[in-house]
Image (cartoon, rainbow, N blue to C red):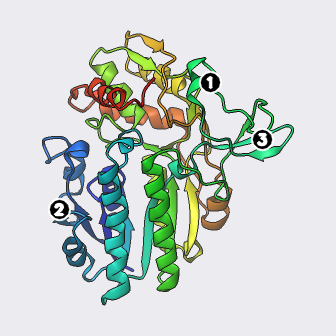
Amino acid sequence: MKNILITGGAGFIGSNLTVKLVSKGYNITILDNLSKQIHGENQDSSLYNSIKGKAAFISGDVCNKSDWEKALKGQDAVIHLAAETGTGQSMYEITRYNEVNIIGTAHLLNILANQEHTIEKIIIASSRSIYGEGKYLCDNHGITYPNERKDADMAKGNFNPICDKCDKKLILKATDENSKIHPSSIYGITKQQQEQMILLIGKTLKIPAVALRYQNVYGPGQSLTNPYTGILSIFSTRLLNGNDIDIYEDGEESRDFVFIDDVVDATVLALEKKEANHQIFNVGSGVAITVLQVANTLKELYDSNVNINISGKYRLGDIRHNYADLSKIKNALGFRPKFNFKTGITEFVNWVKTQNIQEDKYANSLKELKQKGLIK
C-alpha cells in the first residue's frame, strides 16, 4: 500500500500525518474543504502550507459523493480524519455534525460496497468522547461507569461522579477499549456511529478496518482560531490577548492530553501493521492531567500575569474524567508515547510564540452555548 487518501489531510492531525507518510515514501492525496472554523478566513494557513507541494490536494467535501469518487481513484488505503469536532457546538449544530460525520462516512462506504475500487485498508479517527464519563471503581460494587452528572448536583458544587447504586465516592481508573460506550454529546454519538459503520462494512467487505480512539490531541500546528475545541489553544489565545481564564467546575476535571507526534506514530502503526486489522485502539498518553494544571502551566510558560479564576460554572454534558488505558495498543502494535505533558506543552508554547496572535473568539462561543442553555 503506497497510495493513501487522507480526508481532512490539511487539518491538524492530517497535515502532520501527511508530512510523516511522505517522508516514509508514501504517495498522499488529501481531500479537504479547508473549513474556516479550522483554518480561519485566510485559508492559506500554516496547516495548509505545511503540506503544500508534498501531496496531491483535492478541494472537496466528504458530504459530496462525487468528491469521494474523485479522491478514491487509484488509492490503496483511506485514513478518514475529516469531521466536525466540537463537543459543545455539536449540541446545537446537530444537523451539520450528522451530515459531515455520519452521512459523509456513508458516502465512502456506499462507494466501497457498490463500485469498483482498490482500497485495501480503512482507518477511522474515532474519539475518547464515545466513552462519555470514564471508568471508575466503587468499593462496594466494583467497576462502574457512572451516568451523566445531574444539573442539581453540579449546581451545589458536587462535581465528582458517584456510584449509581450506593451514592458512594468513586476511584478513577484508566478507560480500556472494552469500557462502556455511553457518549454524552452529539459529537460522541456521531463518532460512535462512524466507528461502528467502518468496522462493520470493513468486515463485511473483507477490507481491514481500524478505529483509533484519539484522546485530546495537541501540539504545534493545531488551530488557534477555533474557539470550540482544544483548551490549550483556547487558553493560549486568551493569555496572549491579556484576557483572564475562567476555569469551569473546580479545575480538578481531567483529560488525557496526547502529543501530535505520538498520534501520528500510532496512526502509522495502524496503517502498516496487520495486527491492527479489524481492531479498536485507544491512542493517548495514559496520564490524567487536570484543567487547572493546564492553565497554570501555560501561564508560567507564557510568563503571563492574567488571573486564573475558578468559576464554578459548568457545561451540561461535560464529563469529569477520562484517560486512556494503553495496554492493548502497546501489546499489539508496540506503541509507546514519547512525549510527557511537560515536554509536549513546552514544544506547543514555543511554536505558538512564533505565530501571529489570534483574535480571541472564546467569549462569542460561550455566548452561543449560554443561549442554548448548555452553560450553567
C-alpha distance separating marks 3 and 1: 20 Å
| Viewer-side label of 2, 3 | 3
C-alpha distance separating marks 1 and 2: 53 Å
C-alpha distance separating marks 2 and 3: 51 Å
Residue bearing the label numbered 2: 53
| Viewer-side label of 1, 2 | 1
Residue bearing the label numbered 1: 153
Residue 166: horizontal and vertical position, in percent? 81, 34
In percent of the image, x 42 and y 49: which residue is there? 187
- Does dot 3 land on a helix, a strand or a loop? strand
- Residue extending farthest to the bottom is 116
| Viewer-side label of 3, 1 | 1
Residue 69: horizontal and vertical position, in percent? 23, 78
Name the one closer to the observer, 359 or 222: 359
Do tag 2 and tag 3 residues touch (Cβ < 8 Å)? no
The amino acid marked with disc number 1 is Asp
Structural crowding at the residue carrying mark 2, measured as other residues with C-alpha within 10 Å and reported as few (<14), some (14–19) or many (≥20)? few
The amino acid marked with disc number 3 is Leu
In percent of the image, x 29 and y 20: which residue is there? 240
Name the one closer to the observer, 328 or 133: 133
Q: Quadrant of the N terminus?
A: bottom left
